[in-house]
Amino acid sequence: MAALALTGCGPAPSAAPTPTVARSTTPPSSAGAAPTTTASPASSPGLSGKVVVLDPGHNGGNASHPAQINALVPAGRGQEKACNTTGTATNAGYAEHAFNWDVANRVATELQAKGITVIMTRSSDTGVGPCVNERAAIGNNADAAAVVSIHADGSDSAGAHGFHVEYASPPLNAEQGAPSIQLATALRDSVHAAGFALADYIGANGLFGRDDLGGLNLSDRPTVLIECGNMRDAADAAVQSSADGRQRYADAITAGILAYLTATS
């Protein structure tokens, strides 16, 4: 959700958590139905060996650990913010953290089929965190070619509908500048081409530069956050709540990442 769209959270250990290298070829059962499409196992020339970090926003255990997720951590630009948040949900109760986890696993499966190494910032949908600063560190330490944080919004504005992609603005380093904007644009274009409406209540033309998100501010890799529609909108929620809809999002996000990696290889 835009107001709470931090790129992760949890207890603040003395060292950053060990990232999870995604290896499974289908999402785990807790992530929902398996993908409805089968990716080719052949590696794509120029992409094999690339590292992509996927950051499924929030976590399933965050709500039961308020002290940990409310602890303040560095968020860039001299700010401190809560380690993480619980995320939003549809009006029917489908949680954003579950949506994020499902879509991220589907994207991981498709990217791995192209020979890309995928690192996830969390290893399950039942844990707590990690914090936003820790999630940013995972992408930085991996020297990721791209970092994509996957979320869904929770705006209560009447009629708020559609997806948008966020990036750090103004940039704090070179990678937050043109590379991140290029990644954001590639994702915007691919998701829109897949038939998803651009957000009509935030940003401009599906893009939104922000200076208040720790996961974006603290990154020194090309990094964006995609809000896959508004979970409080009935039409968006219907797509997000279906396995076919989540596969559509995953296919479109994968296409955008591949387009960016191909263009920058």
Image (spheres, rainbow, N blue to C red):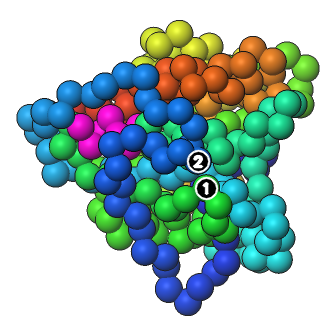
Left or right: 139 as drawn, with respect to 39: right
The residue shown at (70%, 42%) is 96
Front-most of 172 and 183? 183
Q: Which residue in the rendered view is the most extreme toward the front?
A: 29
Q: Position of residue 85 (x, y in %)?
A: 75, 59
Specify few, some or many for label 1: CA neighbours under 10 Å numbering under 14, 14-19, or 20 or more: many
For the point 47% across and 13% down, the residue is 194
Pointer 2 or 1: first along the chain? 2
Q: Is 136 drawn above or below residue 29 in the view shown?
A: below
Residue at x 32%, y 65% (from the top left corner): 142
Confirm whether residue 40 shows in the render: yes
Q: Of helix, strand and loop, which one carries label 2?
A: helix
Is 264 colored magenta in this rendering?
no
Number of labels in the image equals 2
Residue 229, compared with residue 178, is above or below; it is above
Residue 32, image x, y percentages:
57, 37
Residue 56 x %, y %? 55, 50
Q: Give, as a three-letter code, the residue at label 2.
A: Ser
CA–CA distance in space, label 2 to label 1: 7 Å
Q: Name the residue rendered at 21%, 49% in the picture.
A: 50
Residue bearing mark 1:
125
Instruction: Determine crowd level at label 2: few under 14, some 14-19, many 20+ residues with C-alpha closer than 10 A.
Output: few
Label 1 is placed on what type of residue?
Answer: Asp
Identify the mark at residue 137; answer none if there is no mark: none
Magenta region: which residues? 107-113
- Where is residue 127? Give x, y as percent: 64, 66
Q: Are marks 2 and 1 in contact (CB under 8 Å)?
A: yes
Residue denoted by label 2: 30
Q: Secondary structure at mark 1?
A: loop
Query: Looking at the rendering, which quadrant does residue 1 occupy?
Result: top right
Q: Is residue 150 visible?
A: no
